[in-house]
Image: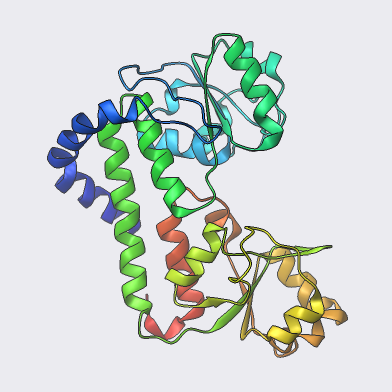
Amino acid sequence: MFNLLRALTAILCVPLLACQANERTAGDARELDDFGVQVPSGTQAFRRIVSLNPTTTEILFALGAGDRLVGRSDWDQWPAAARRVPAVGPGLRPNVEAVLARDPELVVLYASADNRAAAAQMRAAGIATIALKVDRVSDFRGAVRLLGNVTGLGTAAFALVDSVDVVLRRVRAATANAGRPTIFWHVWDAPIITIGQGSYLDELVDIAGAKNIYSDLRAPSPQVALEDVARRNPQFILAGPVGAQVLASDPRWQVVPAVANGRILVVDTALVGRPSVNLGDAALSLARLLHPRLGL
């Protein structure tokens, strides 16, 4: 369904989007990345790109720029074609020499404090470098538009954003009157890490018709105490396949009623693991878990 919606949206929107892309070029040329550095002019279309972030790598492939990638991080595994791109090491504190050895025109990396030094080194070497922090749905939209601009694929970028938004709106509308069960998302066990309002996963839970018990915490991945999870008493637990096994087998978690009563919902971690082109499908998968009677 997601792919069909994407195709229909692209067909319907291409003429309008082409006009929008032309109208926005001048503004994009003055845009700053998430390190506060001006991004390259929209008049350029980079052909040799190293992407050191699974999200931006996936976006570049979705835009039709996958054949321009000459390097990726060890973590970039989607789509399958990305695995054929040479890996240059980790995405955090990257090996600058390995990146430069790929002779890139453009490097895209995650805007983490750990990457500031590497970004500065690559810019000092004369390589256009963009740092993007994609943690929220709005960040995804901005990253797609920016990458579409610097690759000369602005029309494809606007079509991609619209196709994802179509599905997100459809899921929100379908779950609007279905009730809002409370959930706890188990991300990590030692220490216990969950999702807060700073995470796109919190947004997806809301779109899918549920309430994250830690949406009051501003951090994207806060550490919490087991006793507090029990006190907040979520109706359901969301966890990946491994996490679900940990919860079910660890007697300490029996203090949480949802665990004791077997209300653990296993999420597709490959689908929800990145704030990228699968955001619509990810929201739909959560809605199906949380509201099976809707028949989505």
Q: Residue at x 72, y 21 (%)?
A: 95
Q: Residue at x 60, y 78 (%)?
A: 183
Q: Residue at x 61, y 62 (%)?
A: 218
- Residue 123 in the image: state x and y as whole percent: 57, 15
Against 199, residue 40 (above or below) is above
Against 125, residue 134 (above or below) is below
| Residue farthest along the right direction in this orientation | 251
Against 211, residue 73 (above or below) is above
Between 25 and 177, the one lying in front of the other is 25
Against 150, residue 167 (above or below) is below
Horizontal relation, residue 259 to residue 54: left or right? right
| Residue farthest along the left direction in this orientation | 15
Tell me how the rendering is colored: rainbow
Q: Quadrant of the C terminus?
A: bottom left
Kindly indicate the quadrant of the structure image that contains residue 51. top right
Horizontal relation, residue 190 to residue 110: left or right? right
- Residue 194 in the image: state x and y as whole percent: 68, 65
Total labels drawn: 0
Q: Is residue 277 visible?
A: no
- Residue 178 in the image: state x and y as whole percent: 40, 85
Horizontal relation, residue 10 to residue 285: left or right? left
Q: Residue at x 62, y 82 (%)?
A: 236
Q: Quadrant of the N terminus?
A: bottom left
Kindly indicate the quadrant of the structure image that contains residue 295. bottom left
Between 4 and 159, the one lying in front of the other is 159
Kindly indicate the quadrant of the structure image that contains residue 137. bottom left
Horizontal relation, residue 238 to residue 66: left or right? right
- Residue 124 in the image: state x and y as whole percent: 61, 11
Q: Is residue 47 visible?
A: yes
